[in-house]
Image (cartoon, rainbow, N blue to C red):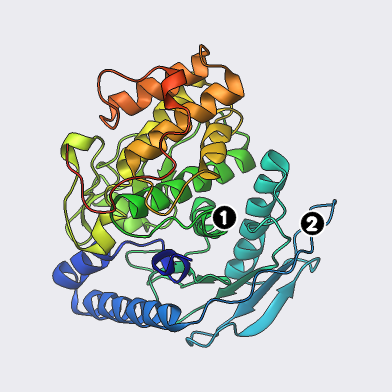
Amino acid sequence: MCTAHRRSMFCILPPHILRSIAARGTDAQRRRALATLATDQTLRAMRAAMAPGAPPVDVTTPTLEPKRTIYTASNTTGLPGTIVRREGDGPSRDPAVDEAYDGLGATFDFYAQVFRRNSIDNHGLPLNGTVHFGNDYDNAFWNGKQMVFGDGDGELFNRFTISLDVIGHELTHGVTESESHLAYIFQPGALNESLSDVFGSLVKQCARGQTAAQADWLIGAELLTDAVKQRGPSVALRSMKAPGTAFDDPVLGKDPQPDRMSRFVVTYEDSGGVHINSGIPNRAFYLVASALGGHAWEKAGRIWYTALHRVKTGTDFAAFANLTLDAASTLYGAAGAERQAVEDAWRTVEVLPAAVAAPAELAGVGGNGGGTGPRAR
């Protein structure tokens, strides 16, 4: 078991944004950012200290029905909190409760309908979420057992239940966790984050019935308050279409994501830049989905999902690129337009070299992944 991954806590708001707020914001904004950073650090330490749990009980049913429970922490940090809505209950009078309930359901439905997956662990795992966590807590996270949502501060960030792709993103960490031992550091960690962005975006696109051309390819667009959006070119936490352009704000800072390997950011912060360098594989997926057209989950998503099942602990960008090439060949043929779209995308973001190996030479390549350290090209 890879403890670096199995015991990680996955937050949607990257620490570099919180650090920027702590350095540039008002006194109140700084206090909230520092409090969120401190809370996140404590939760990560608690997660790392937990012994691995027993394997999930197989409760697979042919009906693929969700089992959701929403709790409220009542602005404390006690988890899971008090139950406020169970599976089958009608809407409450609390938007956060209902958004969490609906978001968990939309994510469950996506994986069930598109991939015949029974919850995020494929064994019918109940989906639990806690809202109103902390006081002005600016984050949402998956802790290995459940989703947890802060209310935001109302100045920079709205409540964290408001964004469906954020919920899909966080729950997809659970999917990756159950399918692989992918390390949460350096390139494997950035790939981990990218997979959550990919399928989080697909959850939103599927719920909205959007094609690749209709999708906005933004992650967390609803999280930024109107005040932030009105004072500058800030639209979301990340852009899969154009990494590095999602925000540019005097308080939040400027989006640091690169869109190709020649701009890879070598850093030891944020577990080796997992929320930064994820922009590279994010753009590769966007390019594949756009080239193939139609609904992105039908072909591009299936290629990525197939490759996910072969990911190993140290799988880096190049290894994953080869896995997607192999998946495209297996699903659609070595000479198909799908494989060519995958190859073109990875070459565009400079993960694959100019000369790409023939399909026969790729058999069995990529699953073991190479380095877990920073790799600039």
Q: Nearer the viewer, residue 43 or 321?
A: 321
Q: Quadrant of the C terminus?
A: top left
Q: Is residue 250 visible?
A: yes
Is 201 left or right of 313, judged from the image as shown?
A: right
Establish if 341 lies above or below 7.
Answer: above
Q: Is residue 237 visible?
A: no
> What residue is rendered at 55% in x and 31% in y?
296
Give the crowd class for mark 2: few <14, some 14-19, many >=20 residues within 10 Å. Answer: some
> What residue is rendered at 62% in x and 39% in y?
206
> What residue is rendered at 63% in x and 78% in y?
71
Find disc 1 in the rendering and name its residue. 175
Residue 173 place in picture, x, y as percent: 50, 58
Is 88 left or right of 277, judged from the image as shown?
A: right
Residue 97 place in picture, x, y as percent: 62, 70
Residue 210 place in picture, x, y as percent: 58, 32
User: Which amino acid lies under the numbered mark 2 shown in the image of this protein?
Assistant: Glu
Which numbered disc flags the more N-terminal residue, 1 or 2? Answer: 2
Mark 2 element type = loop
Find disc 2 in the rendering and name its residue. 65
> What residue is rendered at 27% in x and 51% in y?
276
User: Which amino acid lies under the numbered mark 1 shown in the image of this protein?
Assistant: Val
Residue positioned most to the right: 62
Is 243 left or right of 195, judged from the image as shown?
A: left
Residue positioned most to the top: 335
